[in-house]
Image (cartoon, grey):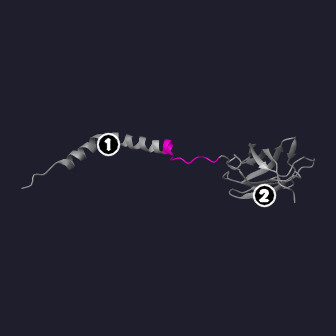
Amino acid sequence: MVKMRRKGQAALEYLMNYWWALLIIIIIGVLVWRFLIGGVPTTPTWLPFQITKVPVTALSIFDNATAYVSLENREGTTINLTYFEISLPGGCVINSTTALPKEIPRGNSYTFTLTNSTPCSLTAGSSVTANFTMKYIVNGVPSVPTDQKTVQIQRSI
């Protein structure tokens, strides 16, 4: 007759008594992997127009002080875009548009042109820091987010 060994029972008793310690070790291991070893991807150096609910997805500024702007509505409901302005160094402000106000449904994009009635000295190929200001209304509540981005001035067509 073969004598039965009780290794399985001992292992099971160990797990039943110390399951909480093993769980803590597993949780700590996951946290170390996620936050210290690289389990979290790095954020990009430039998120499209740090305003994440209504980001600028495309932007072109030309040397004749005309800008083409494309926005995407990620707000979760329809927004009413009432104003958009780009301020450039040297006092150049591009904000004149007949395309606003405009209702943008949730998940849709909207592209419009901004012009400047006063002359600006913009040189094609130069990089400038553009400061953005927009005004939109969501469910009757106004929002005025601002941000900035470095862009390269393009030659006008």
Q: Residue furthest front?
A: 125
- Is 56 left, or right, of 67 in this rendering? left
Q: Which residue lies furthest to the bottom in this view?
A: 157
Q: Determine the residue positioned at 27% across, 40% down.
A: 17
Part of the protein shown in magenta: 34-44
> In the image, is residue 88 part of the stretch drawn in magenta?
no
- Is 13 left, or right, of 72 in this rendering? left
> In the image, is residue 41 part of the stretch drawn in magenta?
yes
Label 1 Cα neighbours within 10 Å, binned few <14 / some 14-19 / many ≥20: few
Q: Residue furthest right?
A: 118
Q: Name the residue under label 1.
A: 19
- Is 1 left, or right, of 10 in this rendering? left
Horizontal and vertical percent position of residue 155:
85, 56
Q: Mark number for residue 123?
A: none
Q: Tell me how many marks there are.
A: 2
Horizontal and vertical percent position of residue 20:
34, 40
Q: How far apart are marks 1 and 2 (CA)?
A: 58 Å
The quadrant in which residue 89 appears is: top right
Quadrant (top left, top right, bottom left, bottom right) of the N terminus: bottom left
Q: Determine the residue positioned at 87% across, 54% down.
A: 98
Task: Check disc 2 and give the amino acid type.
Answer: Thr
Q: Determine the residue positioned at 10% across, 52% down.
A: 3
Task: Check disc 1 and give the amino acid type.
Answer: Trp
The rendered magenta stretch, by its main secondary structure, is classed as loop
Horizontal and vertical percent position of residue 103:
77, 55
Quadrant (top left, top right, bottom left, bottom right) of the C terminus: bottom right
Q: Name the residue under label 2.
A: 111
**Is 80 drawn above or below residue 90 in the view shown?**
below
Q: Determine the residue positioned at 38% across, 40% down.
A: 24
Label 1 or label 2, whichever comes before in sequence order: 1
Does dot 2 land on a helix, a strand or a loop? strand
